Image (spheres, coloured by chain):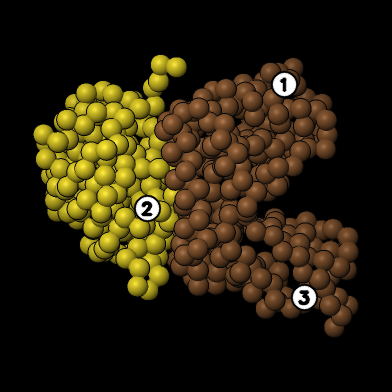
């Protein structure tokens, strides 16, 4: 089990290997379909991103609304493949660490290796359990997107597994 | 004249919506435990344990099992003796609206598939109404997540493709879906009917109890054979490998055209959330 504190520097990121189980503490940013579309629009229109991308983690999630007194609702990962076309454009702009669920396409995998980025997965469908690893959630962009807005999450021991490392490893390809 | 008050339907749906999202049917949890005992991969056993622990937490603290509280799918069976002086679908939509609001559930519906503006209340639900005989209104609800729904497929096979064609179709769908529908999955298979009926059969199939069997002997045999076939693919929980890819296969068949063999697979993720209610008409 590898304990990682954010921001995740390049050295740590490049040392991760497919299959590594990590526990992340610090800050992660949320964003999924609609937010990614807007972030790519920001590139095209030279507008600032909701958060500085360098060494930061984006987590593909749309949480349920928090009950009063809770920092966040249920917050498991959404399927990552839908973000592929956006991620391919965001990686050259500095986004190198992504957390989601499931496999991704060939074009994304090629770009990931080229950009020396990493893709991690969280277990899908355990949103209640994962909500306990989030101590704070701050809305920082696109409030009109409701649960698809960009949130800054403070996490403690958020569990993830390295799915695609920066050297071409792929957890979904098995020799069995 | 037998009637059910509009408010009663709304209130029932509201409760069903919240219950389904917090409380998994014990038979599904039992299935997790049963497969975990047989699972040879340590990582797969760990993933199943996380799924089991998640169910306990959701139930005890009323946190939604999964953040994708889904598109609301409602099947209603309306007894012929019931009279309605209001729009039944309106009563249902209002119940969905209230349940998703009061239950702190996610609003995941956009008004138009291209313009994609959130409707902010998780309506409209997809409602299927069937007329039956009697004085009862039977309601079945599922919050159907997008991840698994997106991996569902439909194919108009040639009758000559037969069972082999169905097997290939199912294997391809499950392998291509990989981890995206959150395996271990439940597979609903509609065979026969026509283009739209096959899809409906598949959706009705995933509403069946996890431990039942098709009454038609060929369907029941196909259920077992497909289950074994899918698990032999070793996709595993979250596609991380293992023996537990599929918890159950449900085959619903229907008469079809002499030139057709429609087949539809509706994939259900492990958060197989369902709720059921029966209301009786009362004399007015």
Q: Which chain is brown?
A: B
Helix, strand or loop under label 3: loop
Crowdedness near tag 1: few (<14), some (14–19) or many (≥20) residues, C-alpha within 10 Å: few
Q: Nearer the viewer, residue B58 or B256?
A: B58
Q: Position of residue B213 (x, y in %)?
A: 76, 38
User: Marks 3/1: CA distance?
Assistant: 45 Å
Helix, strand or loop under label 2: helix
Residue at 14% across, 53% down: A48
What residue sits right under mark 1 in the picture? Answer: B163
Q: What shade does chain A have?
A: yellow
What residue sits right under mark 2 in the picture? Answer: A130
- Residue B32 sits in which quadrant? top right
- Residue A86 sits in which quadrant? top left
Closer to the eye: label 2 or 1: 2
Helix, strand or loop under label 1: helix
Q: Position of residue A107 (x, y in %)?
A: 31, 27
Which part of the image, by quadrant, shows the C terminus of chain B?
Answer: bottom right
Residue at 53% across, 28% down: B243
Q: Chain of mark 2?
A: A
What residue sits right under mark 3 in the picture? Answer: B4
Query: Are dots 3 and 2 in contact, CB under 8 Å?
Result: no
User: Marks 2/1: CA distance?
Assistant: 41 Å
Residue at 19% across, 43% down: A4
Q: Is residue B124 left or right of residue B204?
A: left
Q: Position of residue B225 (x, y in %)?
A: 69, 25
Residue B206 sits above or below residue B37 on the image: below
């Amino acid at each position: 089990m590898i304990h990682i504190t954010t921001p995740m520097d390049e050295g740590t990121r490049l040392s991760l290997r497919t299959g590594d189980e990590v526990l992340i503490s610090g800050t992660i940013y949320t964003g999924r379909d609609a937010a990614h579309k807007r972030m790519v629009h920001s590139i095209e229109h030279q507008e600032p991103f909701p958060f500085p991308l360098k060494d930061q983690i984006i987590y593909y999630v749309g949480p349920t609304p928090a009950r009063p007194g809770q920092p966040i609702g249920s917050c498991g990962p959404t399927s990552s493949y839908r973000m592929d076309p956006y991620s391919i454009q965001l990686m050259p702009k500095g986004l190198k660490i992504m957390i989601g669920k499931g496999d991704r396409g060939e074009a994304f995998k090629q770009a990931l290796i080229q950009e020396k980025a990493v893709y991690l997965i969280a277990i899908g469908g355990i949103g209640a359990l994962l909500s306990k690893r989030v101590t704070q959630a701050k809305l920082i962009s696109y409030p009109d997107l409701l649960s698809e807005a960009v949130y800054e999450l403070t996490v403690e021991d958020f569990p993830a597994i390295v799915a695609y490392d920066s050297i071409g490893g792929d957890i979904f390809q098995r020799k069995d | 004249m037998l009637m059910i008050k509009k408010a009663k339907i709304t209130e029932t749906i509201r409760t069903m919506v919240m219950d389904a999202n917090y409380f998994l049917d014990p038979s599904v949890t039992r299935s997790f435990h049963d497969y975990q005992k047989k699972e040879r991969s340590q990582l797969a056993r760990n993933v199943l344990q996380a799924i089991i622990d998640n169910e306990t937490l959701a139930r005890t603290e009323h946190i939604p099992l999964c953040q994708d509280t889904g598109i609301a799918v409602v099947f209603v069976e309306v007894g012929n003796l019931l009279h309605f002086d209001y729009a039944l679908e309106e009563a249902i939509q209002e119940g969905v609206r209230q349940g998703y609001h009061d239950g702190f559930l996610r609003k995941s519906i956009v008004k138009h598939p291209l313009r994609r503006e959130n409707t902010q209340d998780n309506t409209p639900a997809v409602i299927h109404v069937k007329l039956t005989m009697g004085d009862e209104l039977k309601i079945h609800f599922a919050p159907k997540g997008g991840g698994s729904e997106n991996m569902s497929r439909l194919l108009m096979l040639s009758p000559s493709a037969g069972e082999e064609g169905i097997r290939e179709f199912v294997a391809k769908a499950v392998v291509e879906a990989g981890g995206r529908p959150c395996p271990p999955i439940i597979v609903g298979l509609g065979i026969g009917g026509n283009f739209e009926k096959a899809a409906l059969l598949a959706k009705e199939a995933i509403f069946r109890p996890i431990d039942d069997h098709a009454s038609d002997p060929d369907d029941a045999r196909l259920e077992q054979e497909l289950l074994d076939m899918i698990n032999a693919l070793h996709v595993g929980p979250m596609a991380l490998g293992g023996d537990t890819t599929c918890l159950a296969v449900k085959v619903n068949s229907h008469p079809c055209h002499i030139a057709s063999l429609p087949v539809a697979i509706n994939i259900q993720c492990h958060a197989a959330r369902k709720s059921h209610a029966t209301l009786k008409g009362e004399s007015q």
